[in-house]
Image: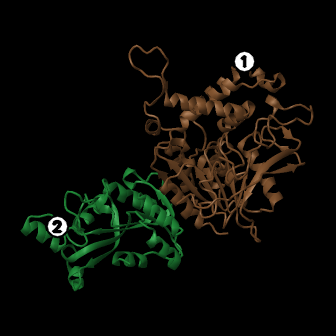
Amino acid sequence: MAAEGSVGLVTANLEHFADPLALRNGRVLPSFELVVETYGELNAARSNAVLICHALSGNHHAAGRYSVDDQKPGWWDLMIGPGKPFDTRRFFVVSLNNIGGCDGSTGPASINPDSGVPWGPDFPQIHVSDWVQSQAMLADRLGIDIWAAVIGGSLGGMQALQWAAQYPERVRNCVVLAAAPKLTAQNIAFNEIARHAILTDPDWHSGHYSRQNAVPTRGLALARMVGHLTYMSADGMSDKFGREIRENDTDMGSEDEVVFQVESYLRYQGSQFSTRFDANTYVLMTRALDYFDIAGDFGGDLTRAMSEITARTLVISFSSDWRFAPARSKEIVNALISANREVTYAEIVTDGGHDAFLLDHPDYSGLLSAWMRQVTV
Amino acid sequence: MRYDLTQIQTWIPAGSKVLDLGCGDGEFLRQLQEERNVNGTGLELDPGNLIAAVSRGINVVQQDMDLGLGNFPDGSFDLVVMAHALQVLHRPHRVLEDMVRIGREAIVTFPNFGHWRCRLSLGLQGRMPVSDTLPYSWYDTPNIHFCTVKDFEALCKQLNIEIIDQDIVAGSGAGWLARIMPNLFGVTAIYRIRAQA
């Protein structure tokens, strides 16, 4: 299954694009930078490149380590490497930080060339199709005419689907994990709660917090706590935390506040996130997620949207994922079936929730491996 | 390959678009793709089978056909095949209707419960039959809807399904008997059907 070899030590490269990027909302990014990591070697025919699309808070560092004493490997090290589903002995794997991100690609924290100060909240709203367009420019730069596969989970899965529909002639295979054709009202509501937490933080300063040398850490932490909660399943949380107590106890006569393990965990996740993630990026990314609707350009007809796709497509959902439930993945699958397109679908039985696409499961990694081995290079 | 599958193959025109309900490890579809250039899709529930089918390059959708096949449009396949699955379905009649709706033609195979050994077991011994083709005891069998050749033909009539072709797999040495009396000597029944015009 997963977890055989590692890609080893990796470095990130910064690619500068001097050409303007015309955005979906009508605005133009005069120039931009993308921070990129690659694993494996591009073959002579340039036919073995696969693109990894990250989710809401992900970045370009998908596999390997930056130094020998680096504690944590990239976020999808489980799946990328020699002998793993995205086998770097066969594939040239490309992973980047999306525009609007906060890990090195051009985003709200970057300097606006027109004003000489950080964009902040004035950074243009990016849509998923803008990411695809910028990545097509990156593919041109790397000499990749056609991706052997474009792969992503959650928001990254939506992006992989968008890639296959926007540039069908450039995507031979498409892997869509724990995704949906668009968000439900409930999903948008969760994103709005997260944004509201940030926007009502006194340190937000209408998004100009960097000018005030402030960071809306409380808002960011709360946003992450809510988000993180929705990525887990009730059963998964019971297994992981139960009612285990971290501090003090519930005995009679005890006056000290009890801290359950789950509280401690969420606080830790929130506080970690608030020191590494940019608040404007969080607002931008959640809005990109809310605005995504692949059938939108086709009068709401998902089958027509899926008719654009020529790639063989693999769709995987996870039984306990209530954020992007299996039924949402099946909407994609059924539209592909109606459009007479080649599709494989599986629902993995797991209590891992939405986050299951990042976790190890023999059915999941086994299926990904089997499917990727059929991808010709 | 099982005889019923060999027989089905001869009924599948080269290059046709085939949906295999309960495709198992995908070996049947793989052979059809290789030998008859068929464009195949499988339906399967078991995760292990799913991986096996994907390893054979088959497009396979994990779906329970008992919950309906409404996501497959009318006439979207040349042929819908279901081998040895009819008897495990909760609503076999609904699935048969779906098959002839989705496919211009459909092929069904099932174990014939009218076979003389089954009758002997039930009629003389008073026990539910257990055999090589039906190896389960009554209480732990996945086979919940047994039928005979006559039952199946009656159901087709009721559902306005036309029988285009029929074949029977007999026990060794009983081939000529099965041709004369399929319901008594046929072990496995094979039907080619379509919706009545």
Please, what is the three-letter code of the amino acid marked with disc 1?
Answer: Pro
Callout 1 crowding tier (Cα within 10 Å): few <14, some 14–19, many ≥20: some
Residue B167 in sight here = yes
From this viewpoint, is residue B41 visible? no
Residue A355 coordinates in the image, percent (x, y): 55, 43
Between B72 and A253, the residue placed more toward the observer is: A253
The quarter of the picture where residue B134 lies is bottom left
Q: Is residue A137 left or right of residue A254?
A: right
Reply above or below: A163 against A107.
below
Q: Chain of mark 2?
A: B
Residue B129 is marked as: 2
Looking at the image, which is closer to me, B50 or A27?
Answer: B50
Q: Amino acid at mark 2?
A: Pro
In what quadrant of the picture does the N terminus of chain B appear? bottom left
* Residue position marked by numbered label 1 in the rendering: A202
Frontmost residue, A364 versus A360: A360
B93 relative to A116 in the view: left or right = left
The image quadrant where one finds the C terminus of chain B is bottom left
Which element carries disc 2, helix, strand or loop? loop
Which is more toward the observer, A190 or A36?
Answer: A36
Marks 2 and 1, how far apart in space? 77 Å
The residue located at (70%, 56%) in the rendering is: A51
| Chain B color in figure | green
Q: Residue furthest left?
A: B124
Q: Which chain is brown?
A: A
Of the residues tagged 2 and 1, which is closer to the observer?
1
Q: Chain of mark 1?
A: A
The residue carrying pointer 2 sits among few (fewer than 14), some (14 to 19) or many (20 or more) residues within 10 Å by Cα, namely some
